[in-house]
Image: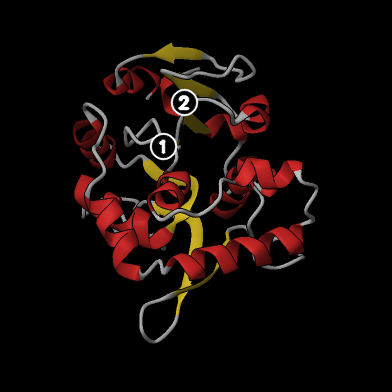
Amino acid sequence: MQPHEVRRVVFDLHGVLIKEKASWAMLRRAHGVPELYPLLKMGLQQGELRSFLDAEVCAAGLTRDDFVKAANAVELNEHVQEIVETLHLMDIGLDIATFSPIIYENIIANSIHPHAFLTPTVSIGHVPMNIYGSTVIFDSRGKYVTTFVYPNDQEGPWSPAVNIRKKVVLDDIAAKYKLEKENILFVSDGFDTEASLHYPTVGYRHDSGTLQTIAEITDLRELLRFM
C-alpha cells in the first residue's frame, strides 16, 4: 500500500477506540435485560425479537441518562487521542463504523477529539469524522422507546446482531467520497470478516481467526506507516 493511497481511516469503536468490547451487552447486563444470542437460538424472528427486546429494555427503565453515564465511564485505548489528532492534522478523513447508540458514541468521540469528530458534512479545512451507529428513541421523559440502526434495512427498526453489516457502511463511505476501496483503511479488533474481505483491514489486537488483515498492530500509532 502506497502512502498516498489512504484517504480515510474507518475505526471500529469497541476494542479499538475504547477498551469496552460490547456496549449494548454492558448496558443490558447492568439493567437485567436478557442477552441477545440465547434469544436468537430460541428461533425468534426479527420482528418478534425486536418487539421482545424493546419491551424488556423499556421494562428495565433505561433512560437517556443511563446511556450518558455508560459513555462517560468508558476507558479509551492507549494513544487514541494522539493518533486521532495526528490523522486529523494530516487531513485524513475519519469515521467510526459501529452499531452502538449514537448518543453514546458522540460523548466518546467528543472526549477523544471534539474538533475532529461529530460533524457529519465535509467542511472547509480538515475533513471531519462521520459516525455511523444506531439511533435510540426516547420519549418526552427520557425513557427508552426503540432503536434504529444505520444503514436501516427494509424491515425497519433493528435488533438482531445478525443484520449488522459493516461492509455496507464502508460501501456507503466509498460512494459518498468517490473513493476506491484501496483509499479506505479499516481498523478492527475482529468479527468484521465480510468488511475485511473487501477493504484493506488492519487488525488491532484482534481476536477473530476469520478477520482478513493486511497487518497486525498492537499500538495505534503504527497506523501512521500506512499514511
Q: Position of residue 155 (x, y in %)?
A: 76, 65
Count of picture labels: 2
The numbered dot on residue 208 is none
Left or right: 187 with respect to 158? left
Q: Is residue 220 above or below residue 64?
A: above
Q: Residue at x 64, y 27 (%)?
A: 193
- The residue that mark 2 highlights is 189
Amino acid carrying mark 1 in the image: His
Circle nearer the N terminus (2, 1): 1
Q: Residue at x 29, y 35 (%)?
A: 87
Q: Position of residue 165 (x, y in %)?
A: 65, 43
Q: Is residue 8 above or below residue 68?
A: above
Q: Is residue 129 above or below residue 140?
A: above
Whether residue 152 is visible here, answered yes or no, is: no
Q: Are marks 2 and 1 in contact (CB under 8 Å)?
A: yes
Circle 2 crowding by C-alpha within 10 Å: few under 14, some 14–19, many from 20: many
- The residue that mark 1 highlights is 14
In front of the other: 21 or 99: 21
Q: Secondary structure at mark 2?
A: loop
